[in-house]
Amino acid sequence: MTDGLTKHYGQVVGVEDVDLEVRAGEAFGFLGPNGAGKTTTMRLLMGLLFPTRGGATVLGLDCWHDSVAVKARVGYLPGEPALYKRLTGNELLSFIDGFDGGSRGYGVELAEKLELDLSRRVRESSRGMKQKLALILALMKKPPVLIMDEPTSGLDPLTQRVLYEILNEHRDDGATLLFSSHNLFEVERICDRVGIIRDGRLVATESIDELRAKRLRHIEVAFNDGVPPGLSAVPGVTDVEEVGKRVRFRYRGDIDSLVKAIAAYDVADLSIAHASLEDVFLEFYGAGAGGEVK
Amino acid sequence: MNWNLIRKTVSDRRRGTLIYAGSIALYVVLICSVFPSVKNIKQEALQNYPKNLSRLFGVQSLDLKLFNNYIVVQFLALIWVAIVGAFVISYARNMISGELEEGTLELLLSQPIERWQVLTSEGMVLLAAIVGIVVSTVLAIFVFGTLFKVGLTYGGYAAFAVLGIALFIAIGGYSFFFSALFNEHRRAVMAAAGLTLAFYLLHFAATYSRVADKIDWFGIFHYYNPFPVINGGVFPVKDILVLLLFGVVGFALALWVFRAKDIT
């Protein structure tokens, strides 16, 4: 929970007056363009940065005064995990286990699930292997709180799926999860709620259901008998563009209503694509959303 | 202190420390082996040295036919200080600014460990390494000095070892401070090496300049005079305490800076 959390780097605003509450046991997705303040918020929660003003607590513990107690209860995955290059995966597990003890066994189990060779040195590992190792280090203590900065970054789709299963297991065990992502599908799959941060400010907090209702899709339909008139009158349809017997448009709303509306005609082909996160920002939060979206 | 971190730091630094200690031992072998053949021409060579050399070493006159004098001039007064000083500065920069630059400090500080524990744990390992290198230097002088029959007198080396340890604790103290202060390890190294060089130049200038002489007490080399310590066997309590004070102040400043440092 943060209360007016603010961090300035000289004249540059990292985050400004962020009031965020992640409820016990929920999975909270943190969305925003690059440089919006996601990583800064997470580093503040871990006591790695000191706030310009405001405060933050994790499980009722102050993130700075009780930082050791907080870190004993939090598994943290940095956005760009840097590991000791000279060490092997096994040695790193032993080192991190040495701070608390008793978590190495689960670390080895996670390595098997993620198909990671722990005998390999970090310096000889690929980007994906390092990400897997960093994930194991964050998860191995089975902490009650997980703070993860883009956990699926660098992972192949199969490993991402395994990670979703692992994260869901942790959630089933009662863990609270705060993670940032650029993948809307991933956020929808795991999270209960999302917070959207822009220019250092938390501009919206929504449940996944609310987000789904607002979700934008790119639709392309080919009709055997030509594009039917009145399609643009269907609620939620915008930016209609006809090319011969095909039509492209954007749609926001309940997908079931749209499919039923289209099914009244002779459909040759149908393509539905989820909008990118950038589209979501631009649609929901206007031109000021700006910034590159990862 | 945190024993888990101490174990890892020992493992990380063991190889480098052994390489430094081994290199120093080899240098001692070289000096001991050539001394019997060159000792007769050394006094003539001394004529070419600066007139204030004796004053720089804190003595009235130098007789390089004596091995203790020879090894101080050829090794312990400058080259040894430069080698071990480089080791200490390099160690300190790897600790904070080096780990910060590589990003591993984020991993370390996301574990349940206080920041002061990180510094004190790694500081203890540095202290152990300093003691190891200084003691191994003295042992190498004893062993190879005896083997090559250089006419070694042993009396003052224990006091010299303590003085040497105190000198490198002083260098380690401000090197820790610069490592905690700067985010880039190059700047930390430049600052620590630059200050060490400035202290040495100040001490050197003090042999020529009255002004420099008046402020020489401000630098660490004012308190490092191996020649009278090795020859006289006098335990330089005041010098050692002042050097230790340099180290403690530097380390305290490092703790103060590091406790509120943003890890970006």
Image (cartoon, coloured by chain):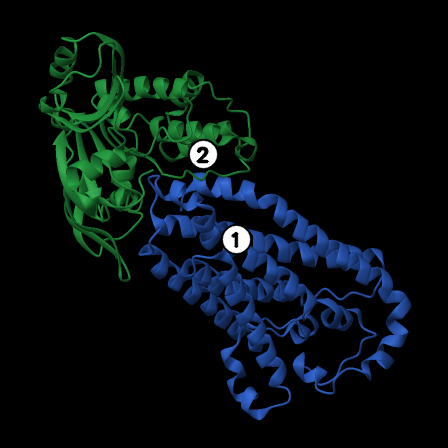
Chain colours: A green, B blue
Residue A95 is labelled as 2
Quarter that holds the N terminus of chain A:
top left
Q: Is residue A113 left or right of residue A89?
A: left
Q: Position of residue B260 (x, y in %)?
A: 31, 56
Q: Nearer the viewer, residue A84 or A197?
A: A197
Residue at point 75% right, 69% down?
B74
Could you tell me the amino acid type at mark 1? Leu
Residue at point 62% right, 48% down?
B16
Q: Is residue A6 above or below residue A31?
A: below
Could you tell me the amino acid type at mark 2? Phe
Q: Nearer the viewer, residue B143 or B171?
A: B171
- Same chain shared by disc 1 and disc 2: no
Task: Say which residue label 1 marks.
Answer: B126
Query: What subunit carries mark 1?
Result: B
Residue at point 16% right, 41% down?
A285
Q: Position of residue A247 (x, y in %)?
A: 24, 21
Residue at point 23% right, 36% down?
A30
Residue at the far bottom: name it: B210
Query: What subunit carries mark 2?
Result: A
Estimate how packed mark 1 is, as few (under 14), some (14 to 19) or many (20 or more) residues with alpha carbons within 10 Å: many
Q: Is residue A224 above or below residue B28?
A: above
Estimate how packed mark 2 is, as few (under 14), some (14 to 19) or many (20 or more) residues with alpha carbons within 10 Å: many
Q: Position of residue A105 (x, y in %)?
A: 40, 20
Label 1–label 2 contact, CB within 8 A:
no
